[in-house]
Image (cartoon, helix red, strand yellow):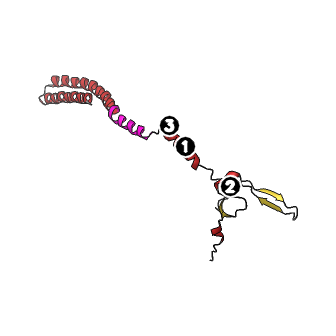
Amino acid sequence: MNELESVTSKICSAREILNSAIDRLEEHQYDKAGTLLYAVDEFLQYYLAEFDTKFKDAWKETVMKVKQEEIDALRYTDKEMDAMCDNAAKQDKVVKWQLPIEEVENDDTGETEYFITFPDDLLEASNLKVNDEVEWVDRNDGSFIIRKIDDAEKDVEIVK
């Protein structure tokens, strides 16, 4: 930042030269005013380029350094990432299944019967066992939710 302040003071010196040029114009000393204006133009081109470089350096040193520290604070260690992935894997069980509807012809009646077979992972995820009663809830989008009816729900009667 000290280097930036140094360049800023040089630019202020150029301003003083410009003020002198204005004074010479008011005194109708056009040759001196012209010389001072050319001088200030040369000084400013050099000083502004230097200011731009020093400003960028100061920006990197202050703002970008702070920003990088914030980014570094958000980074997870490999151990933390592994723990999060392990936890996500435990929680990230499949929640949707697309099951084919199977059909078989009943030899006794000749009628076609339709059924689905629940895969083991679906049974495990939904805590279902063979012979459990389930309720089919139509989601009105071509899909259904299957809920296990536990013993407490079997005894509840809803009257409308």
Give, as a three-letter code, the residue at label 3: Asp
Circle number at residue 123: 2
What residue appears at the point 54 percent right and 46 percent down from the top-left corner?
Answer: 87
Dominant SS of magenta comes to helix
Label 1 SS: helix
The span from disc 2 to disc 3 (Cα, nearest Å) is 34 Å
What span is in magenta?
60-76
Q: Is residue 69 left or right of residue 100?
A: left
What residue appears at the point 67 percent right and 51 percent down from the top-left corner?
Answer: 121
**Label 1, on which residue?**
85
Instruction: Looking at the picture, tell me which residue is in the foreground, 130 or 76.
Output: 130
The span from disc 1 to disc 2 (Cα, nearest Å) is 24 Å
Q: Where 19 falls versus 91 (above or below)?
A: above
Give, as a three-letter code, the residue at label 1: Cys
Residue 31 falls within the magenta-colored stretch: no
Q: Is residue 128 left or right of residue 18?
A: right
Circle number at residue 78: 3
Label 3 SS: helix
- Label 3 neighbour load within 10 Å: few <14, some 14-19, many 20+: few
Q: Assign the N terminus to one quadrant of the image.
A: top left
Image quadrant in which you'd find residue 27: top left
What residue appears at the point 67 percent right and 53 percent down from the top-left corner?
Answer: 122
- Label 1 neighbour load within 10 Å: few <14, some 14-19, many 20+: few
What residue appears at the point 35 percent right and 37 percent down from the top-left corner?
Answer: 66
